[in-house]
Amino acid sequence: MPRKLSQRAHEIPPSPIRKLLPFDLQARERGINVYHLNIGQPDIPTPQEFVDALRGKLPPVLGYGPSQGLQEYREALSEYYGRYDIPFGPDEIIATHGGSEAIYFAFMAIADPGDEIIVFEPFYTNYIGFSIYAGIKLVPYATKAETGFHLPPREEIEALVTDRTRGILICSPNNPTGAVLTRKELEMVADIAIEHDLYVVSDEVYREFAYDGEVPTSIMAIERVRDRAIVVDSISKRYSACGARIGSFATKNREIYDAVLRFAQARLCPSTAEQLGAVAAYHLPNSYFEEMQAEYQARRDAIYEGLMEIPGVVCQRPKGAFYIMAKLPIDDGDRFAKWLLTDFDHEGETVMVAPGAGFYATPGMGRDEIRLAYVLESSKCRRAMEVLGHAVHRYRKDVMGA
């Protein structure tokens, strides 16, 4: 018999989203129209400028690039940050394989195996995988749907700090909740980090996705915490280029930067081709984002208003990203999500959702919640909510016996 697998191989959980794909395929093979609100894959076309750059700017030999990324990519990103008064120079940025690698690099740089990082749940489910890779422990604080998933008072966060705590991880605008942290909340996080000698890892992938006049605040707007802040970013959602896998790690802390550069050297280099596409995308005018914001706000409203028509649903209208985390009058989100694909349809249609429990580290949390990604046009979002309403009613009657 072969030797047993590693502990991390046993601990890493399956994706709460991708594990449902076989049931989605079976539903479609039965002729069911599935509204895919389960994954943050925008349907807006990738900018033509990105595609044209791939066609026209590739060198005759696609060789290794610099480990920190192409100079033109880091300059373009620095210029982009300048539009938001985020003070990163090209030599404070490292190109990464998506935002995922940037988060993993951050964990590896600031914490040793067994160390802890505070995170606010529900959170992006892959944080768990990255923490297992790095051998660290995520220490969660559960935020509530009833309060729009905003942060708790300072003393409740500080109660989680131990002698193994190395950082605080925040995400704003937030996946999966759509919450946008206020400047006051970021000031509080900065003060805690300074008081307890911690780092702040700020996931700012959804910066442009903000609605109702909301303007997200970057952690870099808090000057006193800049020397202990790390910003992770990505083109995936910003430019509807999830498959390009280009992100970034940025910090003004030279010691952290140098350590992460060595990590980057160990994996050789990020993709040269997609960086060239990203350069073209980062040169797009702000009008690109204005049109996108208007489209997603309409989708947000269609989903939220449809949810409010379903008896027993609890959620607030999110201010950012393109997700809604909703509490439903159901017993088990995993069972409900599978049932939607295996046992339910309304007029030949159903909805694919992401079960809420997968976005929590605390066992038992989020069982009555689902995450919806409003990545379909408004009319489809509206119809999907009509179908979901019928599904909740039938599930409670046929499965729960309520």
Image (spheres, grey):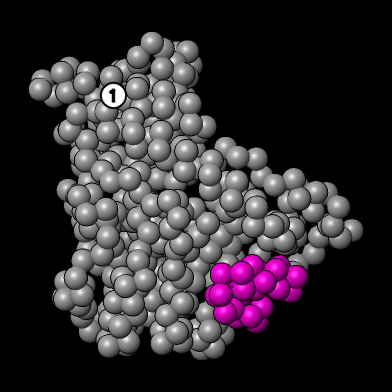
What residue sits 15% from the left and 18% below the top? 397
Q: Where, quadrant-wise, is the C terminus in this rendering?
A: top left
Q: Which residue is mark 1?
A: 389
Residue 271 percent across, percent down from the top left: 69, 60
Residue 351 percent across, percent down from the top left: 38, 26
What residue sits 23% from the left and 58% below the top? 143
Q: Can the viewer see residue 189?
A: no
Q: Residues within 10 Å of mark 1 (few under 14, many from 20)?
A: many
Query: As drawn, which residue projects farthest toward the right?
Result: 60
At numbered mark 1, what does the secondary structure look like: helix, strand or loop?
A: helix
Q: Quadrant of residue 213?
A: bottom left
Highlighted range, magenta: 66-95
Where 379 sits versus 365, above or below? above
Left or right? Give the position of 5 relative to 276: left
What residue sits 64% from the left and 67% below the top? 80
Q: Quadrant of residue 384?
A: top left
Query: As drawn, which residue projects farthest toward the front?
Result: 213
Left or right? Give the position of 161 relative to 100: left
Q: Based on the picture, tell me whether residue 382 belongs to the magenta stretch.
A: no
